[in-house]
Image (cartoon, grey):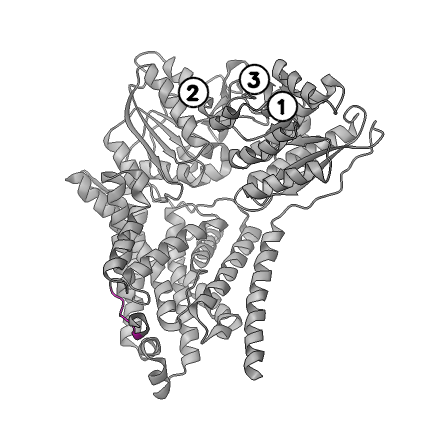
Amino acid sequence: MEQLVQTIALGLLVGGILALAASGLTLIFGVMDVVNVAHGALLILAAFLTWTVWREADLDPLLTVVLTTPVMFAVGGVLYFAALRRLRGTSPSMTVILTFAIAIVIEGVMGFVWGNTSHAVTPEYFTKSFRVGGLFFPKGQVFGALLAIAMLAILYVFLTRTWLGRAIRAASENPQAAQLTGINIAMVAGLAFAIGVATTGAGGSIISVLFTFAPGSHVQWISRLLGIIVLGGMGSLPGAVIGALLLGTAESLASVYISIRWATAVPFIVIFAVLLLRPQGIMGTRLREDVA
Amino acid sequence: MLQTFFMRRKLLLVAGGLALAMLAAACGGGDEDAPSGGQGGTSGEPIRIGTSLPLTGDFSEPGKAAEQGYKVWEKLLNDGDGLLGRPVEIVVRDDASQQNLAVTDYTNLISQERVDLLLGTFSSLLNLPASAVAERNQMVYVCPACGAPEIFERGFEFYFFSQQATADNQGNLYAEYVTGLPDDERPKTAAYVTQDDPFTAPVIGGLQEKLEAAGIETVFSEIYPPDTRNFDTIANSIASRKPDLVAQGSIFEDGVGLVRSFIKAGFSPSSFFQTTAPSLGEQYAEGVGAENTEGVFFAISWDENLETPVNAEFVETHREMFGGDPAEDAADAFASAQVLQAAVEAVGDIEDQEALADYLHENEVETILGTLQWDEAGRPQSEFLLAQWQGDGFEIVRPEEIATSEEIVHPKPEWGR
């Protein structure tokens, strides 16, 4: 029983962090129909920025979010206006090619700046755990998950309670109608992209504490994140959270109760199963073109 | 008209993005310098030695290190008396870590470039198909990193692996050390966990076999997929069985990940062995925390402080040429070239490849890794070095005659104290 609780707890902690990482990706897809393959590379970029700040200024890596978030927001803005804006109105497959190219460029730049070796951010608590009875809760994961929840809450409040947030949602749900009410769709799309990229600031900071990372690590992250948002429903923020928690616990349970060998395969089996029953994902809405 | 204009702009944008991407990939590639032959006591046409290396792609890091090792050997020879009095020229092709390109490269080197001799590429994965090209053309093929046991099952006559032992024997000295401990210090139970990889899995498999034969009970044995990132649950499963000894077949990130997860789970085995990861020095110490490295065992083929012939010169020339300490992979490549050199010098001829192969099957060769010798299938017959983290770096602790430290830390200090 203790083993089961421990396994689920570890899965949920990782799931919470995956949720934050996937939130930006699903937001960008929801508003812009852009499949941002560069999202993993941006996460790793934020991890490297965290590493540098932690090294140079000795600032706690999880506190660096106050720096990495605005920096990544700016990176997102630049990427949008320099490249992605030109793809507005084209098919999502076109955006895959462009963002894939961006991912490779970012990887090359990171290799040039930080070298192609593995890096790690190791604050004093990185190998410490909270202990409750026989259970352990790694501090890095707990702090990371709390930070992720806080960031997700801010994002949720922004999207539902502010005019700008509502404009973003309006643009995502019905661009033509939104335009008719006076929303500048181009600006809103740019803003949504920049906000989506800004979430990688906190995501990257958390990841830098929990895992080692190298410029090439982004490939593993993007495949997992895409899996999460397909599972949760492309474009749905609550869907991304549910998808991430499901994936985190499925992986954790599989490695203990089935076999470690199956741990990375089981989440994808879950995804297949969900998509067979609900092709639009758990929280996704069925669009007219899906039915046709 | 306007629409076509915009369409073209979009196309240009995509093409531009791809071009940038390729540029980034190309920047990572090695440059093919002209050889520095012709100085020293050499004369005549250079002897041309062809190799294909993964200078880009997944194995680019070891691939580039191997290129450096070959280039250091080329320079040392050309500054000296050359090979059979002639300068040498290493012709390097990039196989982008792709099996089919490695095959194309070697075919091209043999049939178009008409190189005189061959040197192997990096990793068992690439050497497996590439060596078949050499074998078909009856050319000696010495490779620096190709120890997966199944490679030697093909009955090749011209194939030689120039490290100390095949993967399944990499843990031999560790097994010997552990089983030789006095009864009260000897581990009673062991856990084995390895990445699903053609190199690491046989290392751990071989170790498990030996420790089981010596009566150490196996309480956990699992293989995890290469893309495993989170080791908390694995660490928790192992910790619940409380093994005295843990052996992990790790590459790098997985090695760091498991140690971190063990510490978080509050578990610390009294003896701990990993493949590869701990040999990556500072990266490893940074990853697991410098205070957690003490006492970790690993097998290694080379160390810069080894007192083998030419090793000091190799290290110094490498620093001069590339401005840094050589990687183990560079040393392994250098040793491959030394093996080829020894055969050529002994036979006194580069035409008779069969004679070169026969020489290597029958004789020992001195390299910077130590003395190497091979069986009829090209399996090396020596032992890897056993290293252990002690203080700020690692020491060679076995075999005793070349050990850099007489002490062995046992039991491993508890993690997280």
Residue to which mark 1 is pinned = B368
Chain of the residue that carries numbered disc 3 in the rendered image: B
**Residue B376, labelled with which disc?**
3
A71 over B314 or under it: above or below: below
Which label sits in the foreground, 2 or 3? 3
Please rate how many residues cluster around mark 2, counting C-alpha atoms within 10 Å: few if below 14, some from 14 to 19, many from 20: many
Asked if residue A217 shows in the view, the reply is: yes
Q: Which residue is mark 2?
A: B174
Crowding near pointer 1: few (<14 within 10 Å), some, many (20+)?
Answer: many
- Look at the image and give the residue range highlighted in magenta: A283-288
Q: Is residue B229 left or right of residue B15?
A: left
Q: Is residue B362 left or right of residue A134?
A: right
Earlier residue among tags 1 and 3? 1
Q: Which secondary structure dominates the residues rendered in magenta?
A: loop
Residue at image coords 69%, 27%: B313
User: Please, which chain is the residue tagged with disc 1 on?
Assistant: B
Q: Give me the C-alpha separation between circle 1 and circle 3.
A: 23 Å
Tell me the residue at 48%/44% (across/down).
Answer: A118
